[in-house]
Image (tube, helix red, strand yellow):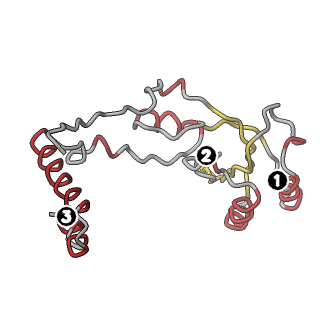
Amino acid sequence: MGSTKWEIVHIPGKPPISPTQQPKVNVFASVIDPKVTNTLIRKLNQIAPLEDLRHVKRVRKSCSNGQTQLSLILCLAGEDGDELGSMPEHVLELVNCYQLNPFVTQVCRHAATTKEEWEEQCKLWPTSFHPPTYNIDGITGFNEEDSKVVFNHMNHALRLAISSNRQVMTLIPHEIAD
């Protein structure tokens, strides 16, 4: 376990995309009666979950002619476009049962990584925004001195682990924590 030096290397995420150039996907949505919102959300989450669009909020609230209006994402629209025939059968049953009038709209395909992207996304449809934690002060990693201390403690813990003394094995978590 000589004097090997470990180097911490930052691996960047996806390259930044201009907020106005974010990739989008078509979805079916419908204006709904606020009284049935919870029922529809529960049913749609079971029959047509938005697995790849977890950042997109299922309901959009807007104001039209002084009245509050709720729109609900029903499901993804097929690659073909806006034909109701591409809607899953169970969703079509809900559309008929609740007398909904589906329309096609666009939402952003990926979660926003910056506030600017998020603001642009919300112009289409509301989304959640969780800023990346690697930019927060105190979570940026270790400085050179701290890296050496961490390396030395981990090296010591490995040496303790390699020694076959069972009593030492119970000390390893304490050594790492210290």
Please tell me whether residue 142 is drawn above or below residue 159 in the rendered image: above
Image point (67%, 66%), residue name = 38
Please tell me whether residue 56 is drawn above or below residue 107 in the rendered image: below
For discs 1 and 3, the disc positioned in front in the rendered view: 3
Image point (42%, 33%), residue name = 13
Left or right of 119, for residue 108: right
Q: Which residue is mark 1?
A: 100
Q: Which residue is mark 2?
A: 53
Q: Which residue is mark 3?
A: 177
Left or right of 38, for residue 164: left
Q: Residues within 10 Å of mark 1 (few under 14, many from 20)?
A: some
The numbered mark, 1 or 2, whose residue comes first in the sequence reads 2
In the picture as drawn, the residue positioned furthest to the bottom comes out as 167
Amino acid type at mark 2: Leu
Amino acid type at mark 1: Leu
* Quadrant in the picture for residue 166: bottom left
Q: Residues within 10 Å of mark 2 (few under 14, many from 20)?
A: some
Q: For the residues marked 2 and 3, what is the alpha-carbon distance in whole angstroms?
A: 38 Å
The numbered mark, 2 or 3, whose residue comes first in the sequence reads 2
Q: Secondary structure at mark 1?
A: loop
For discs 2 and 3, the disc positioned in front in the rendered view: 3
